[in-house]
C-alpha cells in the first residue's frame, strides 16, 4: 500500500468529491430520522497542507486554494456553505492550513442521532484516524479491508444513509472491483445511497466502467464528472468522477448549478468541462 492521500488532499478531485458528499449529507439532514455513513476508504481524516508531503506536490493550491475566498453567485455560495464551513472549522484563525478529509467533513454534519463508520486498511493511517476521533462515540474507526467489510455492515440498522467508496486506484482492475462490490452491496441494501469516486485518466477505462454500471441491472445511477483539461498521452489524471446510486432528488439540479462554476474555478486556462447525466434511470 503505497498510496498516501496527504499528497493529494484538497486537490481539484477532493473539492468536487467533498462538495458532492456535503450536498448528499445536507439532504439526509432534512429528516430527523438517524442516518449512518460508511466510509470504506477513509484516509487519516485531517491533512496539514503546509506540511512537507502536501507541500511537495502543492496539488491543493489549484484545488481548495483556488475555491476558498472566491466570490461566487449567491445560490452557489449557499450550496457550498456546508463544505467550506467544514474547512473553516479546522482553520479558526482564518488561514487555510488544515484540510479535512471525508470522515471529518462527514463528522461536522452529523447530528447526535447519526453515526459514521470509517474503514481504513493502512496500518499507520488508521492509527492517525483513530487519534483524530478518539473519544467520539458517534464515530467508529476500524482497521479493515473496506471492500471485504462493506457487505458485513449492510444494511445499517438506521436503514438510511450513505456508503462512500473512495479507493486509491493503485492497482489495475479497481474499476471492475468497484462495480462488483457495488452490485453485492446493492443486493444487501437496495435502498441505500452509494457514492463511488473514480479518476478520469484513461478514457477507455472510464468508458468500460460506465458500460459495466449500465449493465449491472442497478437503476437510478447519476454520473457527475469534471475535467480540468483535455485527455493527453501518456494518460494522466485530468478529471474526477462520481457515481451516485439512489441520489437525492435535488442533487442533479444542485450539481447543475455548481459544476459550471467549479469547472471555471478549477480548470486549466478555461479548458475544463463537466457532465451531469444518468447512466441508468428509474
Ligand atoms: N476518502 C478519503 C477522503 O476523501 O478524505 C480519501 C481516501 S484515499 C483516496 C484512499 C484510502 O484508502 C487511503 O487512505 C488508503 O490507505 C486506503 N485503502 C487502500 N486500500 C484499502 C482497502 N482495501 N480498504 C480500506 N482502505 C484502503
Image: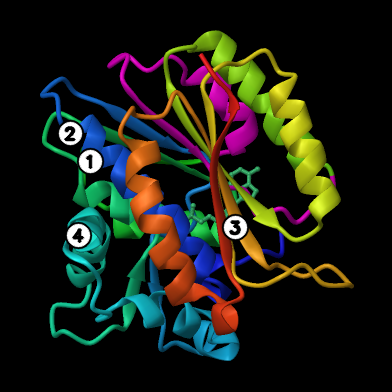
The N terminus lies in which quarter of the figure?
bottom right
Q: Which of the two marks, 4 or 2, is nearer to us in this view?
A: 4
> Quick one: label 4, few (<14), some, or many (20+) residues within 10 Å?
some
Disc 1 to disc 4, C-alpha distance: 10 Å
> Which residue is drawn at the image coordinates 30% and 48% (left, top)?
22
Q: Is residue 60 above or below residue 169?
A: below
Viewer-closest of 186 and 262: 262
> Quick one: label 3, few (<14), some, or many (20+) residues within 10 Å?
many
Residue 183: percent from the left, percent from the top?
Answer: 65, 19
> Quick one: label 2, few (<14), some, or many (20+) residues within 10 Å?
some
Q: Which residue is mark 2?
A: 29
The reply to whether residue 131 is in sight is: yes
Q: Which residue is mark 4?
A: 81
* Tag 3 secondary structure: strand
Disc 4 to disc 2, C-alpha distance: 15 Å
The reply to whether residue 127 is in sight is: no
Q: Are marks 1 and 2 in contact (CB under 8 Å)?
A: yes
* Tag 1 secondary structure: helix
Q: Which of the two marks, 2 or 3, is nearer to us in this view?
A: 3
Q: Which residue is mark 1?
A: 26
> Quick one: label 1, few (<14), some, or many (20+) residues within 10 Å?
some
Disc 4 to disc 3, C-alpha distance: 21 Å
Q: Which residue is mark 3?
A: 240
Q: Is residue 198 above or below residue 57?
A: above
> Which residue is drawn at the image coordinates 53% and 87% (left, top)?
58
Viewer-closest of 228 and 82: 228
Magenta residue span: 144-172
Q: Is mark 2 within 8 Å of ligand 1?
A: no
Residue 175: percent from the left, percent from the top?
Answer: 75, 40
Q: Is residue 54 left or right of residue 139?
A: right
> Which residue is drawn at the image coordinates 58% and 69% (left, top)?
272
Amino acid at each position: 500500500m503505497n498510496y498516501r492521500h496527504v499528497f493529494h488532499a484538497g486537490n481539484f478531485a477532493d473539492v468536487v468529491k467533498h462538495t458532492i458528499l456535503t450536498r448528499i449529507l445536507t439532504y439526509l439532514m432534512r429528516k430527523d430520522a438517524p442516518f449512518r455513513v460508511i466510509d470504506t476508504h477513509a484516509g487519516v481524516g485531517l491533512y496539514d497542507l503546509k506540511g512537507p508531503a502536501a507541500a511537495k506536490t502543492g496539488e491543493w493550491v489549484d484545488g481548495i486554494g483556488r475555491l476558498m475566498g472566491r466570490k461566487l453567485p449567491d445560490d452557489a455560495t449557499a450550496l457550498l456553505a456546508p463544505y467550506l464551513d467544514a474547512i473553516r472549522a479546522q482553520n479558526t484563525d482564518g488561514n487555510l492550513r488544515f484540510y479535512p478529509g471525508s470522515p471529518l467533513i462527514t463528522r461536522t454534519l452529523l447530528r447526535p442521532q447519526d453515526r459514521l463508520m470509517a474503514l481504513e486498511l493502512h496500518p499507520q493511517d488508521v492509527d492517525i484516524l483513530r487519534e483524530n476521533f478518539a473519544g467520539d462515540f458517534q464515530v467508529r474507526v476500524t482497521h479493515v479491508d473496506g471492500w471485504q467489510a462493506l457487505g458485513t455492515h449492510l444494511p445499517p440498522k438506521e436503514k438510511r444513509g450513505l456508503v462512500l467508496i473512495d479507493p486509491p486506484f493503485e492497482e489495475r482492475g479497481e474499476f471492475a472491483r468497484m462495480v462488483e462490490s457495488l452490485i453485492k452491496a446493492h443486493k444487501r441494501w437496495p435502498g441505500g445511497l452509494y457514492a463511488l469516486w473514480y479518476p478520469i485518466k484513461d478514457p477507455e477505462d472510464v468508458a468500460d466502467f460506465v458500460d459495466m454500471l449500465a449493465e449491472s441491472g442497478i437503476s437510478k445511477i447519476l454520473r457527475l464528472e469534471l475535467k480540468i483539461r483535455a485527455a493527453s498521452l501518456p494518460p494522466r489524471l485530468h478529471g474526477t468522477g462520481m457515481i451516485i446510486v439512489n441520489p437525492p432528488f435535488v442533487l442533479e439540479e444542485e450539481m447543475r448549478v455548481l459544476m459550471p462554476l467549479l469547472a471555471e474555478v478549477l480548470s486549466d486556462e478555461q479548458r475544463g468541462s463537466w457532465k451531469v447525466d444518468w447512466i441508468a434511470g428509474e
